[in-house]
Image (spheres, rainbow, N blue to C red):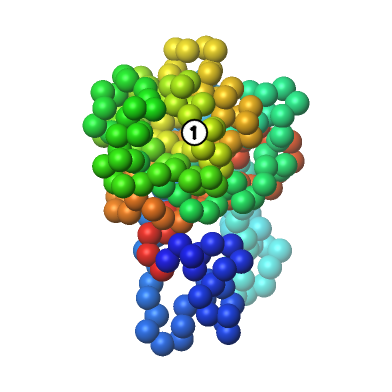
Amino acid sequence: MLDRLRLGCHADAARPPFLPPAEGIKRLKIVDLTLPLPPGLKTNPTHPETIITDHVTHWFTAPRYQSPCKGYASKLLLICDHIGTHLDAPLHFIPGGKSMDAVPLENTLGEAIFLDVSDKPADQPVTVEIMEKKLAAKGEQIKPGDIVLLRTWPGKWGDAIFKAAGISWPAAKWLCARKIKSVGLDLPNADTGGDMQRPCHMELLGNEIGIIENLVNLDKLTKTRLFFIGLPLHFIGLTASPIRAIAVEEW
């Protein structure tokens, strides 16, 4: 399945990539890993809440149009670039680092490996030893170019989540040494919240490895290897961007 999903590769050269055959269509198995964004949401206590309000309504614009058109509606959004499920750019913690528009798109989609380490204590960070143990149990290795997805605790998003520990500094260095593209997890902070040196962010972003935070529904994944898509918005100069994160488990 992954060979058929890799960019530029498809099993049947007679038809475009990603299109199933006309007969015997098999539906994609997709798991949505994205946190919904209702008005008022804050995904970090130091960030502003989400504001979604009317720009114009159908009622307001209706006089400009003729039946059967009843006008149009649009919304005004005021959000932080780190709202919800998002991808950090190096600029977030690295002065002069790449902003979101300069991050290669290939860093945000591709083959991913999923490790469920939620059986560790929530206040214990993800360590090298924890990941190596899970990989050995699965008979897997992290390969160059992988996107690593970590389920770090068994709770739901928002349930004391700000107190859970992220990725240890040695583990961040270990991931960098494996030349991964990005790492994603189910927390709003890849670091342990009280560590104001932010070693995980500094290590990963300093090596231009993306950090994806606030993933949800990782408990619904059934595959260790899958295809991940998490494309950022194409704003200029952002330190991060909300993404629509999905896992494709079957093709």
**For numbered disc 1, what is the local secondary structure?**
helix
13 in relation to 125, above or below = below
- x, y percentage for residue 47? 54, 24
Quadrant in which residue 202 is drawn: top right
Q: Which amino acid does label 1 sit on?
A: Leu
Quadrant in which residue 185 is drawn: top left
Seen at 71% across and 63% down, the residue is 64
From the image, tell me which residue sits under label 1: 175
- x, y percentage for residue 70? 59, 66
Q: Residue furthest left?
A: 119
Q: Is residue 82 visible?
A: no
- x, y percentage for residue 105? 64, 50
Quadrant of the drawing holding the C terminus:
bottom left
Quadrant of the drawing holding the N terminus:
bottom left
The answer to whether 30 appears left or right of 73 in the picture is left
The answer to whether 92 appears left or right of 196 in the picture is right
163 in relation to 71, above or below = above
The answer to whether 56 appears left or right of 36 in the picture is right
Q: Can residue 104 be seen in this view?
A: yes
Q: Return the residue nearer the eye: 222 or 47.
A: 222
Badge 1, how many Cα within 10 Å: few under 14, some, many 20+?
many
